[in-house]
Image (spheres, rainbow, N blue to C red):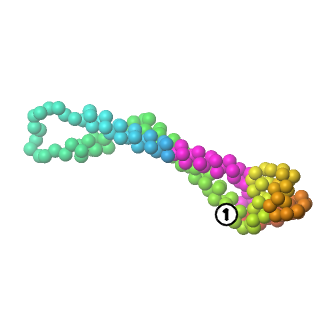
């Protein structure tokens, strides 16, 4: 993977995590809706399939559930259910892409020590300013310089680039 792609994935990390959470929720809702609509469709088919004729037809015992399932399986799926399934598949694909990028970044961050991870998280992922990052760093680990943070970031990014090769 080239360095530009790595930089882009790091910069989009937080947004992708939020998007993945949104997509998981949307997927759950649409899958629930699809299941409910399929049940409603089958129920309405069952109501239409009921015969109110009291006369016997044939001499074999009937299985109304089997007849209903066979009748329902033979019919094409209504267009709105097919569209809903296509929407769900599109969301699954986008979610897979988001989660793949998230796993890549999570893996790259594992090769960094705590201080390097802090600098990359605040500067590359969080797009914070050096002044704010330095203040937070010094509050956590004691006095340090802005140039030291830049060197640490460069060293950390080289580790990430090596891991991404």
Give the quadrant of residue 108. bottom right
Q: Magenta region, mostly helix, strand or loop? A: helix
Tell me the quadrant of the picture where the C terminus can be found.
Answer: bottom right
Q: Please give the name of the residue rendered at 77% of the width and 54% of the height, measured from the top-left corner.
A: 122
For residue 19: magenta?
Answer: yes
Between 41 and 133, the one lying in front of the other is: 133
Between 49 and 16, the one lying in front of the other is: 16
Q: Please give the name of the residue rendered at 32% of the width and 39% of the height, measured from the top-left corner.
A: 42
Asked if residue 54 lies left or right of residue 123, the reply is left
Asked if residue 46 lies left or right of residue 147, the reply is left
Q: Please give the name of the residue rendered at 32% of the width and 43% of the height, measured from the top-left corner.
A: 73
Give the answer, above or below, for where 39 lies relative to 147. Answer: above
- Where's residue 70, x and y in %? 27, 44
Give the quadrant of residue 39. top left
SS at badge 1 = helix
- Where's residue 144, x and y in %? 88, 62
Q: Can you identify the residue that label 1 sits on? A: 107
Q: Can see residue 86?
A: no
Give the answer, above or below, for where 119 lies relative to 71. Answer: below
- Where's residue 29, x and y in %? 49, 42
Q: Please give the name of the residue rendered at 55% of the width and 48% of the height, measured from the top-left corner.
A: 24
Between 140 and 75, the one lying in front of the other is: 140
- Where's residue 89, x and y in %? 51, 46
Asked if residue 49 lies left or right of residue 10, the reply is left
Give the answer, above or below, for where 123 lies relative to 57. Answer: below
Give the answer, above or below, for where 50 lies relative to 145. Answer: above
How many numbered discs, if any?
A: 1
Q: Which residues are magenta?
A: 1-27
For residue 5: magenta?
Answer: yes
Q: Residues within 10 Å of mark 1 (few under 14, many from 20)?
A: some
Q: Can see residue 101?
A: yes
């Amino acid at each position: 993977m080239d360095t530009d792609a790595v930089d882009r994935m790091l910069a989009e990390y937080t947004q992708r995590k939020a998007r993945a959470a949104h997509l998981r929720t949307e997927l759950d809702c649409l899958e629930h809706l699809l299941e409910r609509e399929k049940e409603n469709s089958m129920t309405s088919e069952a109501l239409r399939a009921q015969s109110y004729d009291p006369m016997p037809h044939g001499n074999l015992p009937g299985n109304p559930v089997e007849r209903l399932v066979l009748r329902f399986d033979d019919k094409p799926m209504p267009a709105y259910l097919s569209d809903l399934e296509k929407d769900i598949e599109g969301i699954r694909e986008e979610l897979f892409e988001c989660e793949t990028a998230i796993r890549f970044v999570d893996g790259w961050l594992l090769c960094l020590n705590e201080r390097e991870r802090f600098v990359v998280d605040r500067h590359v992922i969080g797009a914070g300013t050096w002044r704010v990052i330095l203040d937070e760093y010094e509050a956590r680990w004691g006095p340090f310089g802005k140039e030291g943070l830049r060197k640490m970031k460069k060293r950390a990014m080289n580790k990430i680039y090596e891991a991404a090769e």
